[in-house]
Amino acid sequence: MAMEAVEIERLIRAAFPTAEVEITDLAGDGNHFAATVTAEEFRGLNRVRQHQLVYAALKGKMEGSRGELHALALTTKAPE
Amino acid sequence: MNDMSNPAHAAIKADIDANDVVLFMKGTASMPQCGFSSRVAGVLNYMGVAFKDVNVLADEGVRNGIKSFSDWPTIPQLYVKGEFVGGCDIVTEMTLSGELDALFDAKGVAYDREAAEKIRAANA
């Protein structure tokens, strides 16, 4: 079952309540999304750590062949 | 998380210790089997970077093990001098920003800077 954009956004917002979150359905198939997350929590962290925090927020939904979410192109940054 | 009692983790550690640049990918450098793996292998090839390609599809233990080893749920995964650099999005971003050049400079990894400039010019 593919994840909905709203569900991805909900999970990310739950972890980063003050973040700016923008989700784009890249292919229109509910399975390939792009997310841009701008969160104060990312300040001072390298990109790997920033992405790890987002993946953690998605609670394993990216995992393996059972993952509901095949592809999430991720861009993370701290606010300017 | 690095767990040496996991044989896949030990094999992964051996690969990243023995090779300056290692790409864990689906398929091989010459025959990638996933668009994201293909993109990263393509960048490294184009930039003339010597790297070891580890085909995770050939070993289920490594395929699962690399995810816990790096605490990273997706493939491809790029390691430079034992350090996890990132997956497809991060490598793409770093290629276009020039940070990948800077990383290779800092780590003493040979690459073709002109080729990197060409990638940036083509994506400007």
Image (cartoon, coloured by chain):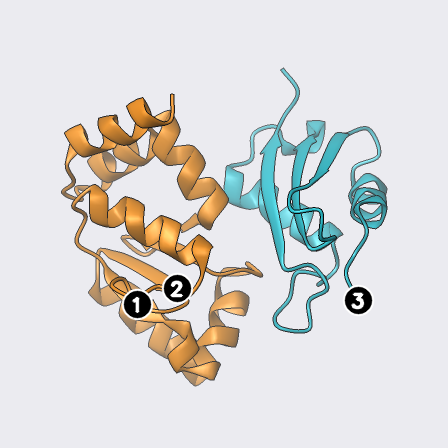
Chain colours: A cyan, B orange
> How crowded is the residue under tag 2: few (<14 C-alpha within 10 Å), some, or many (20+)?
many
What residue does disc 3 label? A1
Please tell me which residue lies in front, A30 or B110.
A30
Task: Indicate which disc residue B82 carries.
Answer: none
Residue B71 in the image, given as x and y percentages of width and height: 55, 60
Q: Does label 2 lie on the same chain as label 1? A: yes
Provide the secondary structure element on which disc 1 rests. loop
Residue B69 in the image, given as x and y percentages of width and height: 49, 67
| Residue at image point 42% right, 84% down | B7
> How crowded is the residue under tag 1: few (<14 C-alpha within 10 Å), some, or many (20+)?
many
Looking at the figure, which quarter contains the C terminus of chain A? top right
Which amino acid, by three-letter code, is at mark 3? Met
Pointers 3 and 2 in contact (C-beta within 8 Å): no
Please tell me which residue lies in front, B50 or B7.
B50
Which amino acid, by three-letter code, is at mark 2? Met
Disc 3 from disc 1: Cα separation: 30 Å
Residue B117 in the image: above or below residue B46: above
Please state the total of marks drawn on the protein image: 3
Which amino acid, by three-letter code, is at mark 1? Thr
Provide the secondary structure element on which disc 2 rests. strand
Please tell me which residue lies in front, A36 or B65.
A36
| Residue at image point 21% right, 66% down | B18
Residue A39 in the image, given as x and y percentages of width and height: 70, 29
What residue does disc 1 label? B28
Q: Is B10 on the left-hand or right-hand side of B46?
A: right
Provide the secondary structure element on which disc 3 rests. loop
Disc 1 from disc 2: Cα separation: 7 Å
Task: Indicate which disc residue B25 carries.
Answer: 2
